[in-house]
Amino acid sequence: MTPAARVQASIDILDEILGGVPVEKALTGWARRSRFAGSKDRAAIRDHVFGAVRCKRSFAALGGAATGRGLMIGASRAAQADLAALFTSERHAPTAVLETEAGRDFAFDAERYDIPDWMWPMFKDSLGDQAVPVAEALQKRAPIHLRANLIKTNRFDAIAALIQGGIVARAHPASDTALEVVEGARKIAQSRAYKDGLVELQDAASQAVVSALDLQPGLRVLDYCAGGGGKSLALAAHDGVEVFAHDVNAGRMRDIPARADRAGAKITTVSTQEVRKHGPFDIVLVDAPCSGSGSWRRAPAGKWALTPQRLTELTELQFEILEVTSSLVGQGGTLAYATCSMLRPENDEVVDRFTALHSEWREAFRKRWLPTEGADGFFASHLKR
């Protein structure tokens, strides 16, 4: 496919997404209908589409319309690309850009930085002088991070193993297990290092949340909102730590046994009905459901789908989960609350509300990670009884 044909395909896919089709479904549907497209074509189109969804408001302003075509005109202008070379009116290419499709200046900061209007004041309140740099970081593609599996390797041996598969990675400062892939990211899934369980895909800040815990041999740890098990695997890589994984939706944990087998890790999955009989636990890690604002580079559609009502529902759910899980922590143990959000209502305010109502609990640790530091945005707080 020519660069112009890739732009036209992206326009078609974006029109579906703007019409309500989920991003991945629209991309998959196009790929199935377009068997002629090679892997490089699909990768380029995916990048176009995700870039346009991340920057939907600013690209619409630059492109003159909130349509697939408008977004791609705006994307081209933002990249200072040659519009005449991409919008050629030739076969399989978009039609030439008209004078009526001129862009405009940004009307306000929320538009310039691609944040919903209602959220911009909260975003600034939560991040202070980091609000604009973080918003600018969220407009860009996220880096690819790996976790060196300490059961089978160390970070520097993992780097050497990845090189054998044509993948170049470097140490990331967020965690002593974290690697940032700088070349060959599309080769990871088929690499021997990945298939043999030497590395796992996991954001560096997510790894840092686990690294911040005092994981000593003999401790019993519950990953309460385990999902696919990324943090469970990171926990189980610490020598002598017994790990239990739970999720209210047990189906989300279906891949944990296979992932644990590949990693050489031992993880016990437990249902909601069973979790109490395995307690109390020395550490309960709660990676709570949240807005995902820290990972909007990876899942940008969530930014536009979030509403004030949904955010309120999430903060209530987060508080309820803290209430439930606090009773699972043994005396002297740690309740570790985390979110992949950067918003105060989901982080500081939830923890402060909990400790205000439960005077027997005190906060021993609080930390925030930001996309400007080269990872996703995350928050963690350790509570002690």
Image (cartoon, rainbow, N blue to C red):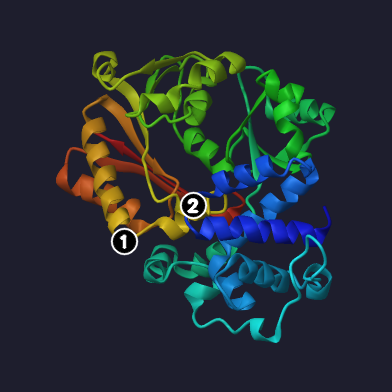
Location of residue 155 with respect to 320 vertically, above or below: above
Amino acid at dot 2: Gly
Q: Mark on residue 288? A: none
Residue 41 in the image, given as x and y percentages of width and height: 77, 48
Q: Position of residue 22 (x, y in %)?
A: 50, 49
Q: Could you tell me which residue is drawn at 22 percent across and 50 percent down?
A: 353
The residue type indicated by label 1 comes to Pro
Q: Position of residue 228 (x, y in %)?
A: 48, 29
Instruction: Label 1: state its secondary structure.
Output: helix
Q: Residues within 10 Å of mark 1 (few under 14, many from 20)?
A: few
Q: Can you say whether 345 is above or below 166 in the image?
A: below
The mark closer to the camera, 2 or 1, is 1
> Which residue is at 66% across, 40% downward?
32
Which corner quadrant of the image does residue 7 belong to? bottom right
Q: Nearer the viewer, residue 37 or 248?
A: 37
Left or right: residue 231 versus residue 82 is left
Q: Secondary structure at mark 2?
A: helix
**Does residue 167 appear left or right of residue 120 in this picture?**
right
Q: Residues within 10 Å of mark 2 (few under 14, many from 20)?
A: many
Q: Please tell me which residue is depicted at 49% across the width and 80% down the height of the picture.
A: 108
Q: Quadrant of the C terminus?
A: top left
Q: Looking at the image, is mark 2 or mark 1 earlier in the sequence?
A: 2
The one nearer the camera, 16 or 22, is: 16
Q: To which residue does mark 1 refer?
A: 308
Label total for image? 2
Of residue 196 and residue 282, the one placed in the foreground of this image is 196
Residue most extreme to the front: 91
Q: Is residue 67 above or below residue 360?
A: below
Residue 188 position within the rendered picture, expressed as x and y whole percent measured from the top left = 72, 32
Where is mark 2, residue-wise? 294
**For the residues marked 2 and 1, what is the alpha-carbon distance in whole angstroms?**
17 Å
